[in-house]
Image: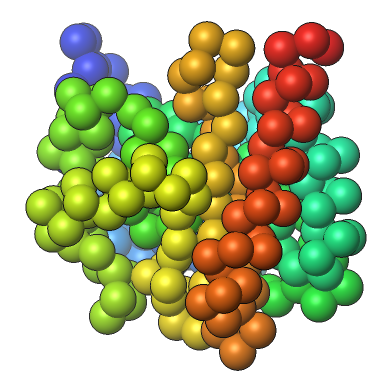
Amino acid sequence: MAESARNPVTSAETAFAVLGGLKELDGAGVTELAAHLGVPKSTADSHLSTLEREEYVVEEDGVYRIGMRFLEYGGYARGRTELYEVAKPEVDRLAADTGNLVNLMIEEHGWGVHLYRGEGDCAVHSISHVGTRVHLHLTAMGKAILAHMSPERVETILETKGLPDVTSRTVTDRRALRAELEAIRERGHAIDDEEFVTGLRCVGVPIFDSSGSVVAAVSVAGPTHRFKREYLDTEMPTKLKETANVIELNLTYS
């Protein structure tokens, strides 16, 4: 459950619901969207026409889709992040070195946000893309971030976002998650063992700023047949920690 706004603007909430509905339906007509959102057809129509006029959605043969204008805002938001500029070359370097998929994640509003990804020669395709928001407990990066947050912040996130399952291996028990976060702090890396995508394993480590606060995490992901336990527990964590260390140094002294 999201936190309540102090003075919510109903029309703005409806506009964002419309955009969310278009994303969930991968495009829709007025009638379908209205039914999906449980709002009058006239409400859906007026919001869609306004969003189209402002060039935030596009319409073709009666089907509305989210427009490319949002890329402008996403690109702007990412580009003004110092972490992105500092981490990008290191993520690309690790992807080329390992041949795998390397992801960079930050936390925002209690979600894990994929900020950047690098793809090596043998990188697998993933359901996530740059900008995707996921529950933190689902991924190695998210758990690496959670493990280094204050207990109070962790509890707030778990209370508001919950612990939904995505696969049969997803950790959905708070006590089990707390124990895992403690283990992550002790060994210095987190593991996603098919908890987000069946057949995919990831290992992730946190990235800290000069004050010691966790600001991001970086991970390497690959198929289970390549990512055996020894690879996850020794070789890959070492490479990731070296990458995180370079990013941390560059954040501090750039």
Left or right: residue 50 compared with residue 136: right
Q: Which residue is drawn at 43% across and 76% down?
A: 194
For the residue pair 219 and 236, the one nearer the viewer reads as 236
Q: Residue at x 66, y 52 (%)?
A: 238
Compared with 114, 123 (above or below) is: below
Q: Residue 220: where, in percent of width, then height? A: 65, 60
> Considering the image in quadrants, where does the C terminus appear?
top right
Compared with 27, 152 (above or below) is: above
Left or right: residue 145 compared with residue 95: left
User: Is residue 178 something that shows in the picture?
Assistant: yes
User: Is residue 111 something that shows in the picture?
Assistant: no
Give residue 223's quadrant in the image. bottom right
Left or right: residue 247 compared with residue 66: right
Give residue 118's quadrant in the image. bottom right
Q: Which residue is drawn at 28% across and 18% down?
A: 9
Outermost residue, bottom direction?
225
Q: Residue 129: where, in percent of width, then height? A: 63, 56
Q: Which residue is drawn at 88% across and 60% down?
A: 96
For the residue pair 44 and 111, the one nearer the viewer reads as 111
Q: Residue 212: where, in percent of width, then height? A: 50, 17
Count all numbered tags in the image, as a single digit: 0
> Considering the image in quadrants, where does the N terminus appear?
top left
Compared with 97, 13 (above or below) is: above
Check the image and tell me how it is coloured. rainbow
Q: Residue 125: where, in percent of width, then height? A: 68, 74
